[in-house]
Amino acid sequence: MRISKSIYLFFLPGLVLYSLFFLYPTISALFYSFTDWDGLSTAFQFVGIDNYTRAFTGDSIFQKTIGNNLKFMLTVVVFQTLVALAFALIVIKNTKTNVFLRALYFFPTILSSVSVAFIWAFIYDPSMGILNQMLELIGLDFLAQNWLGNSNIAIYSLAITQVWFHAGQMLIIFVAGLQAIPEELYEVAKIEGASKWQTFKSVTWPLLAPSATIVVAYTTIQSFKAFDLVFAMTGGGPNNSTEIIATYIYDVAFKSYQFGYASAISIIFMVIIALITYLQFKALRSDRVSY
Amino acid sequence: MKNKLWLATGTVGLGLILGACAGESGGEDSSSESGDATQISFMHWRGEDKAVLDEIIADFEEANPDIRVEQNIYPSDQYQATAQRMLQEGSTGDVFTSFPGAQFESIQSAGFFEDLSGEEFVSNFDESLIAVGQKDDAQYALPYQLVFNMPVYNKGMFDELGLEVPKSWTEFQEMADTLLENDITPIAFPGADIGPNQFMNSMMMNNAPDEEVFQKLQNGEESLTNEWWVKTLEDFKLLADKGYIQDDALGTNQDSAMAMVANEEAAMLATGSYHMNSLLDLNPDLELDLLAPITVEESEATYEGINTATFMLAVNSNSDKKDQAKAFIDYLSQPEVASKYANETGQHLTVNDVEYESEALQNTSYWIDERNTRFQPRFLITNAQIEDAVLSSIENVLGGEDPMAAAEAAQQIVEENRE
């Protein structure tokens, strides 16, 4: 089949937008990552790989942010995936109640992140917050915590907020994936005498793998970039215990005016996300089967 | 089908046209010629002052019909981070405000301050309070507000309990013990937001009376592991260990801390004079004054409190309406205009001959002339990452870390970020 050359014109708008909003900023960031540009003045010096060396050997906060980000990401990926999957299994049938429940679970996703941050900061308030008050009410006051003020648990408190915020979104992906599994396969499993767990393990999960791949990859990227919640709820504190790479890049660029160094961290950040996403795709793809 | 295509095209086209119109109108509003009048942008972070500034601007526009002023207000956090970018572009912030310290330094080094030296209105300001806006013998910015960044205390409660303002660390602890015996939390500390960066100033002012201590820290002549900072951290630890600040202080934000003082559950609010008006709004029966902890013995105390000349008015060097911008600063610096601003916002100002009418302002005015206060030390840290390290060490100690270990961890970050 002969393709007209004019078809390439149709690529043009996409190519222009992609180049303008992705390619150009990325190449700029890469360029500035080798400079000491402060983001304001027109003058800057090339510093070679100094910014990268500093990130890995001379910046303990950046190293801490990687650890914080991994804790945050793992908590969010595990809980968000499990919660979304569990709820999806509950509301899979298209009954009126389930459609309502899906909308209800999806509701937090449409809220603005600053509103969510405000609500949850209030929930977590150690003295006036509803969480500690409820724990006291049901006799579990020993579990009451300084949720955002304790540097050992603050990052996990933020992760729970993130799960609440986005699990509904993932639930929709899982519901779509579950509904695409042919009913006959479940009938066969039933005839074969498979238990519920065996059915899930051998039928549901393998066929849900494409959806799970999307959910896990998207959740990972989302949790790495969860700037707004962290910024609004803790600002990275206490004692940098909730500082993640995205908030740290912001601090370095816009508070310390070290755009060159912030660009280097951004490039490292991009590579980390790409690497983890690639590994996840590879791992989850191996689970895929087709019947 | 054809009709639908036209409808879709028309809708998109109309959207684009409307979008373009909206964009253009928004652009003109921010800073341009509007009709016969020149419009200037006044960029600042005091959203709570918008109403009174609107009134002042209306009066200014009446007196200067050829100038229009539009306020561009950003929350202070956002302001610290993005003001420079907007100033660089030049269309926003013909008149703008700057924080002292790191922000002043970075704006100055980027060259966005118009030199105001020699302008007549400079003499309207108290000479002793505007040095913070100077660099290399030039007056780049004029601090407008005078804030006391030290605890606000419930004077009525102190009188009722027969408590005197403590003059030493020993007396401070005795005072706090008495409050605890009366089931009152001595200090409401908003550790989740501004607590550490405000309270550190009065906690360290006498432990490190050398006003150049942070400059020396930044150039390697001082260390956070030295006596002055380790003692400050030990003092913070003592406050936490003895229950002088509330439990879970690091999870308490400023609204919750203010509520504690307004409800008289706590006697002191570890923020500053700028919260006195808000406290009185919450509980008009409160009688308030200022009190900084003296962390040494009386004979060793050098300072009684902390001041900050802030909300520094400046003209953007990238603006093409500098004359109009200067006219607006001139107007703000007139004693009667400044008095209106001071009384309606509950702030002390750096302008000469301001008449304070409110009881709270009158009662605390003695801090301007009669007390020995020092400029807020935190603002003398010009490197934002070093400032973060200093503040983190306080959070670290309040989280249970040993003061020396916290100081060492912070010092490591200081060394990584020295220029």
Image (cartoon, grey):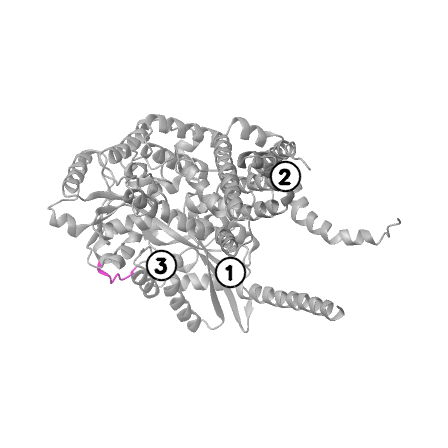
> Tag 1 or tag 3, which sits nearer the N-term?
3
In the image, which is nearer the foreground, mark 3 or mark 1? 1
Q: Position of residue B120 (x, y in %)?
A: 41, 60
Three-letter code, disc 3: Asn
Q: Count the marks: how many?
A: 3
Residue nearest the observer in this picture, B134 or A69? A69
Q: Which residue is mark 3?
A: B124
Residue nearest the observer in this picture, A69 or B272? A69
10 Å neighbourhood of mark 2: few (<14), some, or many (≥20)? Answer: few
Three-letter code, disc 1: Lys
Q: Secondary structure at mark 1?
A: helix
Asked whether the viewer can see residue B122, the reply is yes
Residue nearest the observer in this picture, B248 or B337? B248
Q: Is residue A210 left or right of residue A143?
A: right
Q: Which residue is mark 2?
A: A188
Q: Position of residue B419 (x, y in %)?
A: 49, 33
Q: Is residue A17 left or right of residue A234?
A: right
- Magenta: main secondary structure: loop
Three-letter code, disc 2: Val
Q: Secondary structure at mark 3?
A: helix
